[in-house]
Every structure is written in structure tokens, then in C-alpha cells.
Image (cartoon, rainbow, N blue to C red):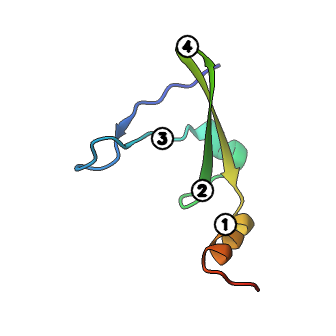
Amino acid sequence: MPDTTTLQKASAISEKSLRTTVPVMITRHFKLKAGDMLQWEIKAKKKDEFEIIVTPVKKKRNKEVEKNKHGDDG
């Protein structure tokens, strides 16, 4: 069954960015916690329809990404 969330402004000064709540059934299933990262991918399906694929990014992977950002080799 689909779950519906309401978009909110990301901040008081934000003109374009919006935020929403990750439904509890998703946070429980993927064991998400505050500070975890999600990767977003959008795919067009029909003229007025699109698919959003959201993938939790594992903590171990986050450390590797940070390492690569700073040019550390190990």
C-alpha cells in the first residue's frame, strides 16, 4: 500500500529545496538512523510519471567516499 508524505520547505530562506519525512516502515526495514545517507535516482516512465529509486548508502561506503574526497590512499 502506498504511503503519502507532505513536502516542506527545507529552510526558511529556501526557494526551491524541499524535504519530507522518511516513513517509519522504510526506516525500520533499512534500519536507518539520523545522519544516514540516501542516494536518489530519477527515471522517467511516462509523460506525467516518474520513478524515484532511493538506496541507503552503507556507513562503510560513506567512509570510503570521504576518504576519496580528500585524496587519501589508505
Residue 47: assigned label: 4
Please name which of the two marks, 4 or 2, marks the residue nearer to the observer. Answer: 4
The x and y percentages for residue 21 are: 48, 40
Upstream in the sequence, badge 4 or badge 2?
A: 2
Q: Do the residues labelled 4 and 3 touch (CB within 8 Å)?
A: no
**Amino acid type of the residue tagged 4 in the rendering:** Lys
Picture layout, residue 50 above or below residue 62: above
Residue pictured at 61% horizontal, 74% vertical: 69
Upstream in the sequence, badge 3 or badge 1?
A: 3
Please name which of the two marks, 3 or 1, marks the residue nearer to the observer. Answer: 1
Left or right: 62, with 49 as reference point: right
Upstream in the sequence, badge 4 or badge 1?
A: 4
For mark 3, give the secondary structure: loop
Total number of numbered discs in the rendering: 4
Residue pictured at 50% horizontal, 25% vertical: 4
**Amino acid type of the residue tagged 1 in the rendering:** Asn
Q: Are marks 1 and 2 in contact (CB under 8 Å)?
A: yes
Q: How far apart are marks 1 and 2 (CA)?
A: 8 Å
**Amino acid type of the residue tagged 3 in the rendering:** Thr
On the image, numbered disc 1 is attached to which residue? 62
On the image, numbered disc 2 is attached to which residue? 37
